[in-house]
Image (cartoon, coloured by chain):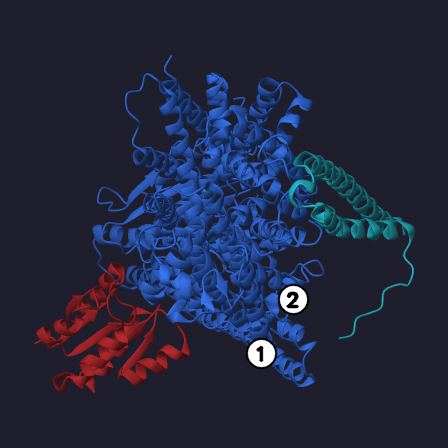
Amino acid sequence: MNKKVLLIEDEPNIIEAVSFILSRDGWDVKTHSNGHDAVDAVRNRHPDLIILDVMLPGKSGFEILKEIRSDQQFALTPVLMLTARGQVKDREMAEKAGASRYMTKPFSNAEVLDAVRSMVAQ
Amino acid sequence: MAPLNVLVLVCLTYVAFLFVVAFAADHAARRGRGMWLRSPIIYTLSLSIYCTAWTFYGAVGFAARSGLEFATIYLGPTLVMIGWWWTLRKMVRVGRSQRVTSIADLISSRYGKSNTLAVCVTLLAVIGTTPYIALQLQSVTLSFATFAASDPTSAELPDQQSTALWVALGLTLFTILFGTRNLDANERHHGVVIAIALEAVVKLFALLAVGVFVVWGLAGGISETIARIDASPIMHWEVSGGRWVGLTMLSAAAFLCLPRMFQVMVVENENEDDLRTAAWAFPGYLMLMSLFVVPIAAIGLQTMPAGVNPDLFVLTLPLHAGRDGLAILSFIGGFSSATSMVIVAAIALSTMVSNHVVMPLWLWAKGGTAVMSGDVRHVALMARRLSIGGIVFLGYLYFRVSGGGESLAAIGLVSFAGVAQFLPALMGGLFWRAANRTGAISGLGVGFVVWMYSMFLPSFGTSSILPQHIFDHGLFGLDWLRPYALFGAEGMDPLVHAVMWSVLLNTAVFICVSLLTFPRPVERLQGAQFVNVFRHSSTATGWSGDLARSEDLMIMSQRIIGSRQAQALFSGAAQCQGLAGYLPEPTPDFLLELERELSGSVGTATAHAMISQIVGGATVSVEDLLAVADETAQIMEYSSRLEAKTQEQARTARQLRAANQKLTQLSVQKDSFLSQISHELRTPMTSIRAFSEILRDTGGLSPEEQAKYSTIIHDEAVRLTRLLDDLLDLSVLENGQVVMNTQTGRLADLLDRTIAAAGGGEADSLEIKRDRDKEDVVLTTDLDRLAQVFINLIANARKYCDAETPCLSISTKQDGAELKIDFVDNGSGIATDQQSVIFEKFAQIGATKAGGAGLGLAICREIMTRLGGDISYLPGQSGGAFRVTLPASVVSSPADETM
Amino acid sequence: MKSKPGPLFLEQRAYRRRRMADAARVLPVLGAILFSVPLLWGQDGSGAALTTKVMLYLFVIWGLLVGLSAVISRKLREEETRSADNQTQSKTGV
């Protein structure tokens, strides 16, 4: 059975690109595009991996990550954070919130695939 | 012929004429055309409200009873006027420099802005003036009755009380209409002043006409008149020295202290130089008024049957001789005297009552919230109107209760003696720096009690209010407390007796208490200001504005002096301090100016109280303390210098804190702008990179997929370009390299276009209100850039206005040469601490983003600067409010357009 | 209290202005005295002065005071404007 990945991101074009790349690599890609109920989506879908954007409408990615980590069930689920703000401060905040990995936009497709594969293999 | 009907008709016509004149004068003054309305002659004539119906009718009666003694009532004011250099000059200067609204205001202001004192003065003035108003009503009623009695066609006498009631109602109406049109007492009552000046001419003319008729018509010439006076009951000069001097002094004092005299002399004074003319012209007027009094009295006494009231000789002599026309003229003269007195007295007293009694009560009842939320202007006007009605009604009540039986002169003198109690406090305030509040209150109190006991209460008759045994054996059976023989002063004339004791005790207590007690700092400052008004006309009271919230002050001021004036005042002050926008730093100077501005509308004490409600406690400022210290101990000077330094440091620290806060905010904004820009740039780039890699690396894509992905890449590239354009636009504008594309067009068309362009589609919830008539102006400027500003403001209102039914009103007004376009929405507006930064680049209010990168208002401001105008945030409105200002060079009216 | 002593002698114009101000101050005192003069005249019974005589006196004095007041206030104004002119002249002239 394919590994399940949940992509939480609000830009439609980026959703399309990431879904394309990952599904061709054999992943089962689910998407979600706002911050309000992102945590609910995680609970419903039980993904093996979460890709989470920082700037989301309604709730920031950091807050969502904190909530996910506070849930026993997902305390260890690997989370890849994406951000368009390339500041050091953001990386620190992501690590503090409990991100497994952190990636700055724009990224190359190969990078994403590498990251995703290595995270689930761990 | 039916004289009574004719009389009523003439009367009504005359009143209608007065209305028209007052209205026209008001109108002309508001249009700024009324310069001649304020000539020194008009000022002099307006002073003639001193000559009331008492003069017109009562003087002759006075002369018929006691000969030349009547002249004292005019000699007193004559001496005051020719001695203007001593007193009046100072009083007018003080009144003007302190923006005083009434005599109560002057006294309260002098003694440390004490409202207690103002209330005392107001009460005394009301009690003292009520009999006088009754006197006017009585004279009009009596003269009506005289006509009715001589009219063979009228079957029954008109009811005296209903005549008085009608007259009272009419006067109230007139006074309210012209006396409470504007709130600021310093915007003077042009209509009223012109009307009373006209009445002054009418009464003088009428009295002279009767005099000429009596001398040349009845007596047959000057020598015959002299012969007849020499044969009359008043042929001998039999005046007691005490009454002659006493009455002259009393009338001089009353002339200075009467609230209505203060109103025309000081409050309505437009130009200090007018006093120079009045200094000789008004004594001349008084002389002419009294010229024929003795002849009329003497000939009246000889011609008229015994038992005819001598007070009405002016009327009965012509009637008796069958000269109906002259009698009507004389009636109009008396009517004029009565009406002008009641009108001005009601205005003066209502200002006092509303400023010192009603407003403080209202403020107190509303707690601290009133100054912020209530409509102060409305309340103040309402209070004045009600007070006018109340005061005239009191006069009517007195008239009914007293039965109108007494001779006119007696009532007049009771009033005079009542207001003369202000004299010690007034003169002491103007000439003696050590005079203080406690002294003034005690003196007034003592004077008032003595006056009440020895004059006012006995004036109702010997056994009406005070029982007979008090007159015979004194209060509590104490012999030295008899009302007419206080402290054993037997055998004196009751009037001289009462005036002597009341003023003497008043002055003595005032001086002693002032010497024994110590004044508060504010009193000492005001004292110095008043006494040395010619040396330094600049004032110093001192607010420390540490806690003042400028915006709160502005909201309050708008409610009192109107938004236009308040905005002008605040922005002017801000400019003086080198600040942009509408909110100046609340420095002591600014607060002082504001207080004085407000006191013109609501009185000194109230304005002081209102500002202190917002600012917190008033303290005395550096300079003031130094001023006081120059004559007190060195130690005080030292401590005040310390305080000076502390205050100066506090102010500097506050400014530094503000600067620091702004810098911090700017840095936070810069950070957030950088990440915002980073986000805006990286997001489209991510898509572009991802899809170009897919196109490059993935084999076997269908042509549809290829087309789709290329389109995405293209769209994202366009998005990037747009963002870069915006950034570039701002940078170009900032560096001033922009080329203006000047066009000509109507503002209304431009707004139409803008609203269409900024439209939010069919689901647009923002309602836009406009005033198209005002928008009919032609602009010659870069219309596209201006449109860009408008679009931004409308889009902002759409995005940020948080009202349930959002509404944006766009109002245009031409203020002087500038054109001002206000965009005001009904949302919650922008917090005061944010207002200073919204026009900075990268600013975004709050953490939530609503699309833009925070460049909109920054671009707007750059554009407006380039166009020679300005855009600013307008605080203190109903919601978020922006004002776009365009310079005169850009604006022309549609008529100028030659296209 | 100490105050700076002024110059000992004033120039002629300022001198005249001060004398006019003095006149303005004296005038009401003069008026009060003149108005009280009739009190010195006989007041008893048949020997009393006639009302007409006193009246004539009062009105003559009254008119005199009005005239004097007019002259003084006009002179004062002239002196004031002239000295004001003078000041601005000397300021700009230097």
Give coordinates of residue B360: x percent, y percent: 39, 61
Would residue B507 appear left or right of B605 to someone viewing this image? right
Give coordinates of residue B827: x percent, y percent: 31, 55
Q: Quadrant of residue B67?
A: top right
Q: Do we see residue B562 in this rendering? A: no
Q: Quadrant of residue A116?
A: bottom left
To which chain does the residue with label 2 belong? Answer: B
Q: Residue at x 39, y 21 (%)?
A: B150
* Colour chain A is painted in: red
Residue that badge 2 annotates? B432
Q: Nearer the viewer, residue A45 or C1?
A: C1
In the image, the chain rendered in blue is B
Q: Residue at x 31, y 85 (%)?
A: A96
The numbered mark, 1 or 2, whose residue comes first in the sequence reads 2
Q: Nearer the viewer, residue A100 or B189?
A: B189
Q: Residues within 10 Å of mark 1 (few under 14, many from 20)?
A: few
Residue that badge 1 annotates? B516
Q: Nearer the viewer, residue B362 or B356?
A: B356
